[in-house]
Amino acid sequence: MSQEMQSKLCLVTGATLGIGKETALGLARKGAHLVLVGRDAARTRETAAWIAKESGNPQVDLLIADLSSQAEVRRLAAEFKHKYPRLDVLLNNAGAIFTRRETTVEGFERTWALNHLAEFLLTHLLLDTLERSAPARIVNVASTAHTRGTIDFDNLQGEKKYSGIAAYARSKLANILFTYALARRLAGKGVTANCLHPGVVATGFGHNTPGLVKTLAGLARPFMTTPEKGAETSIYLASSPDVADISGKYFAKRKPIASSKLSYDEALQERLWEVSEKQTA
Ligand SMILES: NC(=O)c1ccc[n+]([C@@H]2O[C@H](COP(=O)([O-])OP(=O)(O)OC[C@H]3O[C@@H](n4cnc5c(N)ncnc54)[C@H](OP(=O)(O)O)[C@@H]3O)[C@@H](O)[C@H]2O)c1
């Protein structure tokens, strides 16, 4: 275990599997104090114990929340704030794809609720803590799938026409639009916001949903990169001194790269911000 991230508190969502689990392990190995967020208590406890053992770092805490529910996101943020006075890194990693249109307890389409609104709401609820802890970092896990995404405000939640792949691409575009708008608002406050594509990674992704996505994910598995490699850019953005002052960028393989033309549309970023604020009010 190194001391690179010693005394840094890092909250990682979606930490029970895949990229999030390896990201948490990588940060634990750098000496960080981890707070893992999972939705299943037993699985999250098991992961926390595994990370502590693998990293030799006992500072691995956990909080439980189903992030597709805004009530749970609010409870999570309140519990976090009650337990911890600071937050150095917020790593919004949890995400999924849903072949069939489903709605959450609060009536939002599930992909939109989990991949975008949870990230938007959790970040807002923890922003004062992050600002107080500056220098601090926000890292949002997006995807190259965003290049296929569009934002149609009349079909934001697939109300008129639903496709799992389109809903996923839209949510990942929203991650990037949100990151850019957030970085603008955080300029000069000592809190950075960046996003990333982790690569095409053999994880549990797509396995929660039946049909084509699960089949394709299974077929493509031998050609995919490992979760350990997939976590590298998240760990880099969360911890490297090289990016301490970089904000509002999209990364892949630890390098800033261009995201889609649409993602740079500031009017779109701001309109999405307003709509997201209303949807999480
Ligand atoms: N894999 C890829 O090739 C790839 C490519 C580009 C981007 N990404 C992005 O990378 C991120 C991580 O994906 P992954 O590939 O590591 O997927 P994964 O193996 O399926 O892991 C997803 C994580 O999110 C959690 N999660 C799912 N639904 C949740 C909910 N309702 N509430 C709380 N947590 C929930 C899962 O928890 P449970 O253990 O409870 O299910 C799990 O820990 C996602 O944002 C994804 O969009 C992945």
Image (spheres, rainbow, N blue to C red):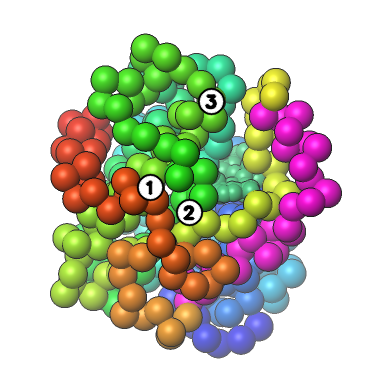
- Earlier in the chain: of badge 3 and badge 1, it is 3
Which mark is drawn over residue 141? 2
Q: Residue furthest top?
A: 160
Horizontal and vertical percent position of residue 119: 37, 45
Residue for badge 3: 164
Q: Do the residues labelled 3 and 1 touch (CB within 8 Å)?
A: no
Q: Residue furthest right?
A: 222
Observer-nearest residue: 255 or 21?
255
Tag in front: 2 or 3: 3
Residue type highlighted by circle 1: Asn
The residue at label 2 has a CB less than 8 Å from ligand 1: yes
Membership of 216 in magenta stretch: yes
Q: Quadrant of the image for the C terminus?
A: top left
The residue at label 1 has a CB less than 8 Å from ligand 1: yes
Task: Name the residue rendered at 33%, 75% in the picture.
Answer: 246
Query: Is 275 placed left or right of 74 in the picture?
Result: left
